[in-house]
Amino acid sequence: MKKIIYLSVIILSLIFSTFSLSEEYISGKVISLLEESIGNEEEGIEKISKFKVKILNGTEKGKEVEVDFPTYLEKQYNMSIKVGDKVVLYKSYDSTDSDSGKEEVEENIKTENLIERIDISDVDKRNIFYFLTLIFVGLTLSIAKKNGLKSLLALFLTLIFIIKIFIPAIAHGYSSILFAVLTCIFSTVITTLLITGFSKKTFIAILGTTSGVIVAGLLSYSFGNLMRLTGYGDTDVLSYAGILSNIDLKELISAGVIIGSLGAVMDVAVSISSSINELYEINPNIEEKVLFKSAMNIGNDIIGTMINTLILAYIGSSMLTILLVYIQSSEYPLIRVLNYEDIAVEILRAVCGSIGILISVPLTSYMGTKIYKK
């Protein structure tokens, strides 16, 4: 999701610099509905509502402007706006002289020889996000208390690493898989150190997690090459191929598998390493074979729910695609559906991520047993 946001900012910036003179997104609040008029049905507009909107930030903070908001005949294009809503305003400027060159356009900016246009781009959802985040943090702290605080700190540091290091590195053409592995190692080290402290079980959890996600990433990369995946399964991404020319999108698929499976694999590795630690502390003379078998038995009990968690997460994120496939099942045979790249990528992610969880169980059990017994 952070990568999509980062790339979207780049894409929008390039589009704006190419097709417009100057544009700006600002916050506003709908004060009142002034009037409604009949739209042009030939243009697909049912009616036009004129709202009075107060600008909430920027150089024109406090200014009230009138904004035309169209309601389309095609209901799926409409956005619900009512008085009292906070909205995102899209302010653009056009030169009064359509034949102006670059120098003349710049001069128009200085002389204010421009036509200003303000539209409602969207409902401002930021306050809702803040409220949901507050609920999440509050419940985490009230239920998990000290460990909850540590978990939130680990999550925060991981997100900072992804935003400040992982995403910029990929955008500059570095290997997605390499930096996904580095992200995995960083997140695992930070999370386990904060929650369990520095110990043998922390070291084992780090080894088990890293091994599992690397296996998942390498498998997805290998089978992605066998499937001849390009990474351009989405038509929207394909339209921005020029902007993404320095990024290996096939590697990006594998990087997504590594990051996506990290949480589940880490959960398995930490649970097994903690179990080995408990078994060893209770009986330091426990035989190596018995310790390994006990760790495997514990891991087997964890596997079922972790695989369900990962598979269902991918299904949930692809619900619209699955629904569209179901609705058009009579028109598209299975051979066609399974060969759509976006569907193939989701299946690859789910299966390879699950294999990463499976592999992490014997790897963590084996490494943990060897470390504790030798």
Image (cartoon, grey):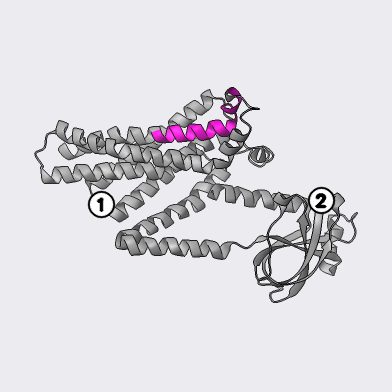
Left or right, residue 45 beside residue 293:
right
Tags 2 and 1 in contact by the CB under 8 Å rule?
A: no
Circle number at residue 198:
1
Q: Nearer the viewer, mark 2 or mark 1?
A: 2
Tell me residue 316's x, y (percent). Answer: 50, 43
Q: Which is nearer the eye, 295 or 44?
A: 44
Furthest toward the left, the residue is 285
Tell me residue 15's x, y (percent). Answer: 72, 50
Left or right, residue 25 beside residue 130:
right
Relative height, residue 136 to residue 5 (above, below)? below
- Marks 2 and 1 sit apart, C-alpha to C-alpha, by 64 Å
Left or right, residue 155 beside residue 300:
right
On the question of residue 362 being in view, the answer is yes
Residue range corresponding to the magenta coloring: 335-354
Relative height, residue 323 to residue 6 (above, below)? above
Circle number at residue 65:
none
Q: Is residue 337 magenta?
A: yes
Q: Which is nearer the eye, 33 or 200?
A: 33
Q: Residue at the spot x=73%, y=75% of the render?
A: 63
Residue type beneath disc 1: Phe
Q: Tell me the element at label 1.
A: loop
Left or right, residue 310 beside residue 33:
left
Q: Which is nearer the eye, 177 or 110?
A: 177
Residue type beneath disc 2: Gly
On the question of residue 231 being in view, the answer is no
In this figure, which residue is indicated by the disc labeled 2? 44
